[in-house]
Image (cartoon, helix red, strand yellow):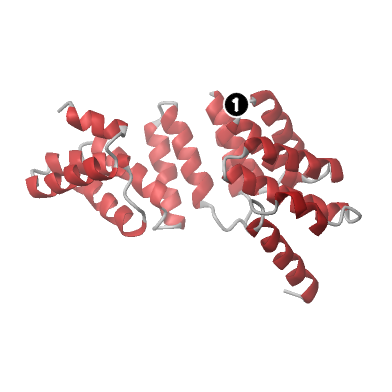
Amino acid sequence: MNLINLTKFCLLSLIIAIVSACASNIHSYINDNNPEEAAKIYTNLGIEYMRRGQYKIARKKLEKALKLNKYSAYAHNAIALLYQKLKVDDKARLHYQRALEIKPKDSHILNNYGRFLCKEGNWKAGEKHFLKALANPFYQEPEIPYTNAGLCLLKHNHPYQAESYFRKALQKNPNFPRALYQMAELSYKQRHYQQARNYLQRHDKIAKHTSQSLWLRIRVERKLGNKDAEASYVLLLRHSFPDSKETQLLNRL
């Protein structure tokens, strides 16, 4: 990283670090005379506000980024994600499409738009965009679109094709938690209980327990007749996630 890029990186890190404490002074750090770089900074600010759940401020920052650089695929993708969170689907679709007009082979945008299409119910188009994302040989996280493709097809009642995608995700990254969990779920539904346990053991080595993973653990250990393990996971679920849907299901047993 050269000195100029290092300076920009440090400046962006500083801005994000002080985004809550010094919101009124942030603009003094940004040079709007360099619209392309300023748009990147506003986009990153928008993403940070979005991550914090401050959607109104996030939208203002992202709109400012697009005002400075309407050809920023990065900003269009970010505001599309925001509108998707806000369930403003027409605007989300518009910005995803605009982002792909600017960068039609960008794997991150293709993956995000695929998820959006799947959520809308258009699983075939969603799958198509996931596969386009995977066509980029330089994409460093192929396990993500593979897993998203699996989730998309699973949601629309294509479990065998979904399993194929989850397996491909694990071929690319054997320690990808989301794919491991989905394979555990599928194995349980297929009554391959020992296999489900094996996937969960791999999952738990690299990811924190969730209410869903603990509930699956309980059901798997019950099927395998391991009462001690089942009891320990019951206690953990009730203690860690007392108000979860899974704890309510447990209490009905």
| Residue 222 horizontal/vertical position (percent) | 13, 40
Q: Is residue 40 visible?
A: no
Q: In which quadrant of the rendered image does the N terminus lie?
A: bottom right
Q: Please tell me which residue lies in front, 80 or 17.
A: 17
Residue at image position (22%, 49%) is: 197
Question: Residue furthest toward the right?
Answer: 33
The answer to whether any part of residue 25 appears in the image is yes
Q: Quick one: 252 or 74, which is closer to the camera?
A: 252
Residue pictured at 71% horizontal, 27% vertical: 91
Residue 145: x percent and y percent? Answer: 53, 45
Q: Quadrant of residue 10?
A: bottom right
Give the answer, above or below, for where 249 lies relative to 44.
Answer: above
Viewer-side residue, 73 vs 240: 240
- In which quadrant will I find the C terminus? top left
Indicate left or right for 155 with 142 as reference. Answer: left
Decide if residue 79 is on the left or right side of residue 181: right
Question: Which residue is located at x 31 percent, y 49 percent?
Answer: 209
Q: Decide: few, some or many residues near mark 1? Use Cα within 10 Å; few <14, some 14-19, many ≥20.
A: few
Q: Position of residue 60 (x, y in %)?
A: 74, 38
Q: Amino acid at mark 1?
A: Lys
Whether residue 236 sits left or right of residue 228 in the image: it is: right
Find residue 215 and report its horizontal and vertical position in percent: 25, 39
Residue linked to disc 1 = 87
Element on which disc 1 rests: loop
